[in-house]
Image: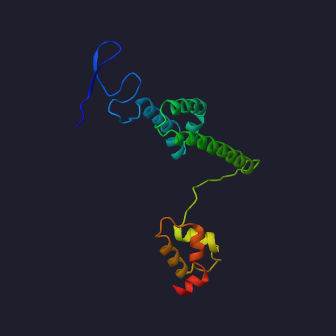
């Protein structure tokens, strides 16, 4: 176990510190500064959590912070190159793009479902997703026609192929070709 460094602060008081005045850690391990952790938490609280919980008003209210946060990220990236801030830069760009798309969708919905002299009621729900094997079946072969059922051999072949976590859609297409099904 390493001992903590006893240092004098700029005020002359003795305190326990792992860093010197240059900001470098005495023990050679890079720890993420508290200001970076607080900054990351601020991005999560102001953008990511409201986005995940679909609180668009909160995201909209905090959009003014994006440019401020981008500038901070650029400054922090120069000061702390090992702080993994590139992903947060991309997150901010993603948030801005998602919000723009959301506004366009809202405008489209207003045009589409606007109330003239008659009342209109529309309720938007989240998309219902099928299991991965059925989604892939629909993507590759198309959805079965009304009254038809999914081919259980193809579904089973897709399930077997999905055990490989690195498989691509193209490889699954090749794997469920008719010639491969006959060999199964």
Outermost right residue: 117
Camera-nearest residue between 54 and 14: 14
Quarter-wise, where is residue 149 in the image? bottom right
Residue 20: x %, y % from top left: 36, 24
Residue 113: x %, y % from top left: 71, 50
Q: Residue drawn at (35%, 26%), measured in percent from left and top?
A: 19
Camera-nearest residue between 112 and 13: 13
| Applied colour scheme | rainbow
Q: Which part of the image, by quadrant, shows the N terminus?
A: top left
Residue 181: x %, y % from top left: 56, 83
Residue 74: x %, y % from top left: 56, 32
Q: Residue drawn at (77%, 48%), measured in percent from left and top?
A: 117
Outermost bottom residue: 182
Q: Is residue 156 above or below residue 19?
A: below
Quarter-wise, where is residue 99 in the image? top right
Q: Is residue 155 above or below residue 56?
A: below
For this view, does 82 lie left or right of residue 109? left
Camera-nearest residue between 178 and 11: 11
Count of numbered circles in the view: 0
Q: Residue drawn at (57%, 42%), measured in percent from left and top?
A: 90
């Amino acid at each position: 176990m390493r001992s903590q460094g006893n240092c004098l602060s700029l005020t002359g008081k003795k305190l326990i510190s792992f860093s010197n005045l240059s900001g470098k850690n005495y023990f050679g391990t890079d720890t993420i500064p508290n200001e970076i952790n607080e900054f990351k938490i601020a991005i999560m609280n102001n953008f990511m959590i409201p986005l995940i919980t679909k609180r668009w008003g909160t995201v909209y209210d905090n959009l003014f912070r994006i440019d401020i946060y981008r500038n901070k990220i650029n400054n922090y990236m120069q000061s702390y190159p090992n702080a993994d801030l590139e992903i947060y830069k991309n997150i901010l760009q993603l948030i801005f793009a998602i919000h723009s798309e959301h506004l366009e969708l809202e405008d489209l919905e207003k045009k589409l479902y606007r109330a003239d002299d008659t009342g209109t009621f529309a309720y938007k729900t989240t998309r219902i997703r099928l299991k991965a094997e059925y989604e892939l079946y629909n993507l590759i072969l198309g959805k079965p026609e009304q009254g038809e059922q999914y081919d259980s051999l193809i579904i089973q072949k897709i399930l077997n192929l999905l055990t490989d976590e690195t498989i691509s859609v193209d490889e699954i297409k090749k794997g469920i070709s008719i010639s491969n099904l006959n060999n199964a």
